[in-house]
């Protein structure tokens, strides 16, 4: 069984990074959270527009997302900062994150006495947490501890025929070795029902998948009310996808699903939900890059594998995002942002098994600390909490 | 004859994917499948492998990717000007 050097956490989870998450429980604490994280080496802030003035399932989804980010094993310690009067209270968020056993602290800005005092207070706590984390060493861990988020963005037709199938080969190998992966982008699975039916572990799991897709399609029909043609700007496929040769959401979906390989689905997860077992899961998040990657990181993904056709530079705070393209022109134009070029498959320069093996090796290298290109440049724009019923 | 590489992903597909830019009159080739392009077709765009009737399905990856908005001739470029898809929106066919 393959192993890698990772950071073993108190609850048995394994991190591929050893950072401190500074999480505001509400948007009112964003300024202080950013101020604190900026002064602590190895700390990252998670500013967001949620935490108050929300209700029911939308509030719950935001709470679950913030909890999941705090629980992600790439963060060895967490500082939660609240204002004091919000719906998602800092003490409650901290308590949920602390169920992992990792060091978690919290305070409220109203109690500490305003922004400047709060930043000072937070920096002192953060420095103490950083000292504690600095003693943590990497140790040999089983590859089954890995959870991968799977995503594609800036799709062109090479994504469906080259880079997604190449990533799928690496995913099949990692799942066979006992690890976990999340496929999302529900609205970009419309049209793949025949494949999903074959790939569900049981008929019951296919029923769950089909019902998630139906729910998604109902919301989409409401959102796209009055749009006569798929090709109109407000519809489901972006202008870049069209110019890249993708003509419909079904065509995009049939190419996109290949990034999850050919292994069977073990179940369906809600937005930001952590699975109770290992394997491949369908996670209920839509296609927006930020919504999806945030949900996958909150579900425990330590690494995101991100396929792109026309090229995208984005990253996520504290969670490495590996970029793979099947378009050699894109790779040469955007080499600063893209880690792996699978485009050689089209010209016969490299075979599918070879490029699949390279992606697998790169995932393990990243797990052991090799920075992705997005990480090196400090890209962090994929962090955004998905709102309930937003496809 | 100028020959251009093409990919046909499944035996039941009625469109192929150009693996290089093709000009009108070029022949797209994948194994034993050959089709003369009736339009300029860019890298990774699709070409019709047979005549396709108005409202009939386009097949790629062995699955339906949309339907024809009008009669399509073998060799025509297939894209959003002659293909539409009903998934994820109201007012289905």
Image (cartoon, rainbow, N blue to C red):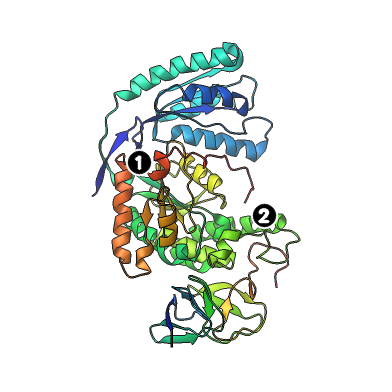
Q: Earlier in the sequence, mark 1 or mark 2?
A: 2
A170 displayed left or right of A307: left
The residue tagged 2 is: A219
| A108 or A198: nearer the viewer | A108
Q: Is residue A191 visible?
A: no
Q: Nearer the viewer, residue A112 or A269?
A: A112
Q: Is residue A352 left or right of residue A290?
A: left
* Residue pictured at 41% horizontal, 65% vertical: A162
**Along the viewing direction, whichever of A106 and A319 lies nearer the viewer:** A319
Helix, strand or loop at mark 1: loop
Q: Is residue A51 above or below residue A166?
A: above
Residue A255: % across, % down: 48, 65
- Gap between marks 1 and 2 measured at Cα: 38 Å
**Chain letter behind tag 1:** A
Q: Secondary structure at mark 2?
A: helix
Question: Residue tagged by mark 1?
Answer: A371
Image quadrant of residue A98?
A: top left
Q: Position of residue A2 (x, y in %)?
A: 24, 48
Seen in the image, is A198 located left or right of residue A61? Answer: left
Determine crowd level at label 2: few under 14, some 14-19, many 20+ residues with C-alpha closer than 10 A. some
Contact? badges 1 and 2 (CB < 8 Å): no
Task: Give the x, y percent position of residue A314.
Answer: 48, 45
């Amino acid at each position: 069984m393959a192993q890698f050097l990772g950071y073993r956490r108190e609850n048995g989870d394994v991190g591929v990074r050893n950072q401190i998450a500074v999480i505001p429980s509400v948007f009112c604490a964003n300024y202080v959270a950013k101020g604190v994280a900026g002064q602590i080496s190895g700390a990252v802030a998670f500013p967001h527009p949620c935490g108050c003035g929300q209700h029911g399932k939308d509030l719950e989804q935001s709470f679950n997302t913030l909890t999941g980010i705090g629980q992600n094993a790439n963060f060895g310690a967490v500082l939660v900062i609240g204002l004091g009067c919000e719906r998602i209270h800092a003490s409650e968020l901290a308590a949920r994150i602390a169920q992992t056993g990792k060091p978690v602290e919290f305070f409220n800005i109203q109690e500490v006495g305003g922004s400047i005092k709060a930043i000072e207070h937070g920096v002192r706590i953060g420095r103490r947490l950083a000292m504690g984390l600095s003693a943590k060493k990497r140790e040999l861990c089983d590859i089954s501890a890995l959870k991968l988020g799977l995503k594609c963005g800036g799709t062109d037709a090479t994504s469906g025929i080259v880079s997604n199938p190449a990533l799928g080969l690496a995913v099949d190998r990692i799942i066979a070795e006992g690890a976990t992966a999340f496929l999302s982008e529900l609205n970009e699975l419309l049209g793949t029902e025949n494949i999903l039916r074959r790939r569900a572990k049981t008929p019951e799991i296919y029923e769950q998948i089909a019902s998630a897709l139906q729910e998604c399609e109902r919301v989409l029909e409401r959102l796209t009310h009055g749009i006569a043609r798929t090709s109109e700007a407000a519809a489901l496929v972006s202008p870049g996808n069209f110019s890249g040769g993708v003509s419909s959401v079904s065509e995009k979906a049939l190419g996109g699903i290949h990034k999850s390989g050919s292994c069977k689905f073990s179940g369906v997860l809600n937005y930001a939900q952590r699975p109770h077992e290992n394997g491949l899961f369908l996670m209920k998040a839509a296609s927006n890059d930020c919504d999806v990657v945030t949900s996958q990181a909150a579900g425990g993904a330590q690494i995101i594998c991100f396929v792109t056709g026309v090229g995208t530079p984005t990253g996520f705070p504290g969670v490495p995002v590996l970029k793979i393209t099947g378009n050699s022109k894109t790779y040469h134009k955007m080499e600063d942002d893209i880690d792996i070029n699978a485009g050689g498959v089209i010209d016969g320069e490299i075979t599918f098994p070879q490029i699949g093996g390279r992606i697998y090796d790169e995932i393990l290298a990243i797990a052991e600390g090799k920075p992705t290109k997005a990480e090196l440049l400090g890209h962090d724009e994929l962090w955004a909490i998905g709102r309930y019923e937003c496809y | 004859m100028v020959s251009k590489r093409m990919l046909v992903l499944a035996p039941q597909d009625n469109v192929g994917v150009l693996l290089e830019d093709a000009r009108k009159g070029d022949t797209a080739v994948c194994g034993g499948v050959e089709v003369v392009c009736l339009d300029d077709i860019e890298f990774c765009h699709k070409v019709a492998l047979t005549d396709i009737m108005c409202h009939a399905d386009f097949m790629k990856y062995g699955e339906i990717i949309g339907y024809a908005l009008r009669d399509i001739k073998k060799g025509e470029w297939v894209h959003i000007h002659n293909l539409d898809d009903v998934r994820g929106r109201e007012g289905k066919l």
